[in-house]
Image (cartoon, rainbow, N blue to C red):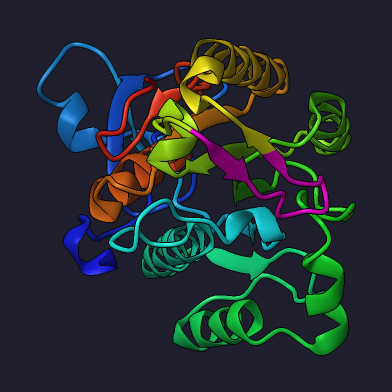
């Protein structure tokens, strides 16, 4: 899947240390004479300095929700939310590593690393975590509190249907250290549209209890309104922290979602609130 997305250096799109040409600018008084590009300057009346694009390796931490609510799909032809979240996480890690970045999985105590070995280790940690970590993460629908380096980047996958105050507190704790992040809300299409009709029994996956209703369609208008309000508030939380919120539905192609996600990681400014990825817009 990662091979379908453009390869190459994950450029920072700003001036800094690197080999890729970025731009020419006029010579300034504080510049050293050795910084002048004499070939370019010879073609004009002024002096010009050649600048390159910053290509320093970035440390990116990744996390996927493994709580019971992610073990849901509304149809046998659809993937579980957990499977789609982990697939996108691993494919994004592969792209970042190919671009020269360092990656690490949150909550396991590993330091960010580069190269193929880093991807293999991350995959093993994600799919076969130590028993103690697996038990703890299975009860947690938000990443554990972890002291990340200032100006790091973080990528979180989950349904983010937790209480908004819990989400806000966790993101604020990271943002205070100038950690930039992307939230990828992964939802089954039935969670977006509530297409059920007639007598329906809803099972609580996280000990919320069960609910049986005579006419499920009677819940639809209020449910959709509450979901939209929750997502709007989630977007506000992300925007206040300088983060991005993207939405992906499991009935949409994972490849397009990955491309949009990878492009979002390269952006310095927050994306539009609640932007849909993979062709699955808000409904």
- Can you give x and y, in whole percent of width and height, for residue 79 in the image? 38, 62
Q: Is residue 112 left or right of residue 132?
A: left
Front residue of this view, candidates 38 and 71 = 71
Is any part of residue 154 visible from this angle? yes
Q: Which quadrant: the N terminus?
A: bottom left
Chain part drawn in magenta: 199-211
Q: Is residue 51 left or right of residue 157?
A: left
Tell me the quarter of the picture where residue 121 sits.
bottom right
Q: Is residue 141 left or right of residue 103?
A: right
- Can you give x and y, in whole percent of width and height, for residue 251 in the image? 30, 47
- Can you give x and y, in whole percent of width and height, for residue 229 in the image? 62, 12
Instruction: Give yes or no for residue 205 being in the magenta stretch.
Output: yes
Front residue of this view, candidates 204 and 188 = 204
Residue at 57 percent across and 66 percent down: it is 102
Q: Main secondary structure of the magenta part?
A: loop
Residue at 30 percent across and 33 percent down: it is 280
Front residue of this view, candidates 7 and 193 = 193
Instruction: Give yes or no for residue 217 being in the magenta stretch.
Output: no
Q: Is residue 162 left or right of residue 220?
A: right
């Amino acid at each position: 899947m990662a091979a379908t997305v453009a390869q190459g250096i994950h450029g920072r799109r700003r001036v800094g240390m690197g080999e890729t040409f970025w731009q020419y600018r006029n010579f300034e008084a504080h510049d050293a004479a050795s910084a002048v590009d004499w070939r370019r300057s010879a073609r004009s009346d002024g002096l010009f300095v050649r600048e390159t694009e910053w290509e320093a390796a970035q440390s990116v931490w990744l996390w996927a929700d493994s709580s019971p609510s992610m073990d849901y799909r509304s149809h046998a032809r659809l993937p579980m939310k957990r499977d789609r979240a982990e697939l996108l996480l691993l494919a994004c890690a592969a792209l970042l590593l190919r671009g020269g970045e360092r990656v690490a999985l949150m909550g396991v105590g590993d330091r960010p690393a580069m190269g193929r070995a880093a991807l293999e280790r991350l995959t093993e940690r994600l799919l076969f975590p130590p028993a103690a970590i697996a038990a703890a993460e299975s009860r947690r629908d938000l990443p554990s509190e972890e002291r990340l380096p200032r100006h790091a980047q973080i990528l979180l996958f989950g349904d983010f249907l937790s209480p908004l105050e819990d989400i806000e507190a966790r993101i604020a704790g990271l943002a205070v250290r100038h950690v930039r992040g992307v939230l990828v809300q992964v939802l089954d299409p039935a969670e977006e549209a509530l297409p059920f009709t007639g007598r329906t029994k809803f099972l609580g996956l996280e000990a919320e209890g069960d609910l049986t209703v005579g006419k499920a369609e009677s819940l639809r208008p209020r449910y959709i309104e509450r979901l939209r309000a929750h997502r709007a508030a989630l977007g506000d939380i992300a925007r206040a922290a300088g983060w991005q919120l993207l939405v992906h539905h499991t009935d949409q192609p994972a490849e397009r979602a990955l491309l949009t996600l990878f492009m979002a990681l390269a952006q310095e400014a927050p994306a539009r609130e609640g932007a849909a990825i993979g062709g699955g817009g808000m409904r």
